[in-house]
Image (cartoon, rainbow, N blue to C red):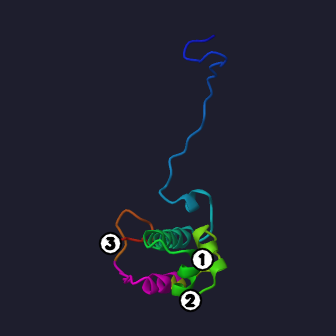
Amino acid sequence: MQTGAKKGEVAVSRKIKVTESSGNVFADLGVMDAEETLAKAEVASRICDIIAERKLSQTAAAKLLGVDQPKVSALMRGKLDGFSSDRLFRFLNALDKDVEIVIKPKRQETDHGQVRIVVA
């Protein structure tokens, strides 16, 4: 038995290449429109959090959001292809949340403007 290994185990040394994230997993994976995809995912996540906080069933959430239950299921599973940002914003409004969009100059250190979601 080698040092550091439990009985019946063999210690193996492997070199694993690790790449630091850019902060946007979708950009790291090469997804088109990565910033918009990340923004939609963050908004959808907040919607799911609100539904969970209120202990709403998918059926009750669907009624409140004005969609059918399978749409809520898709949203909760991260299947966001059928959801525009505008539609997600309307869901937040239906859940009694205000949505503010702020347009400002880009940060000096970035090449182009970015979309960010800030939860207050």
Q: Of label 1 and label 3, which has the lower sequence position?
A: 1
Is residue 120 visible from the viewing direction of this image? yes
Q: Which mark is residue 120?
A: 3
Query: How far separated are the C-alphas under marks 1 and 3?
Result: 24 Å
Q: Nearer the viewer, residue 26 or 90?
A: 90
Looking at the image, residue 69 sits to the left or right of residue 42; the answer is right
- Position of residue 66 measured from the top left corner of the image (x, y, whole percent): 56, 89
**Which amino acid is tagged 2?**
Gly
**Which amino acid is tagged 1?**
Val
Q: Is residue 55 above or below residue 24?
A: below
Question: Element type at marker 2?
Answer: loop
- Position of residue 34 measured from the top left corner of the image (x, y, whole percent): 56, 67
What residue is disc 1 on?
A: 72
Quadrant of the drawing holding the C terminus: bottom left
What residue is disc 2 on?
A: 66
**Which amino acid is tagged 3?**
Ala
Query: How far separated are the C-alphas under marks 2 and 1?
Result: 10 Å
Q: How many numbered marks, from 0 up?
A: 3
Question: Element type at marker 3?
Answer: loop
The structure residue drawn at horizontal position 48% and vertical position 69%, both measured from the top left corner, is 52
Query: How far separated are the C-alphas under marks 2 and 3?
Result: 25 Å
- Position of residue 55 measured from the top left corner of the image (x, y, whole percent): 47, 71
- Give the magenta-colored segment's residue range: 88-104
Among the 4 quarters of the image, the one containing residue 67? bottom right
The structure residue drawn at horizontal position 61% and vertical position 23%, both measured from the top left corner, is 13
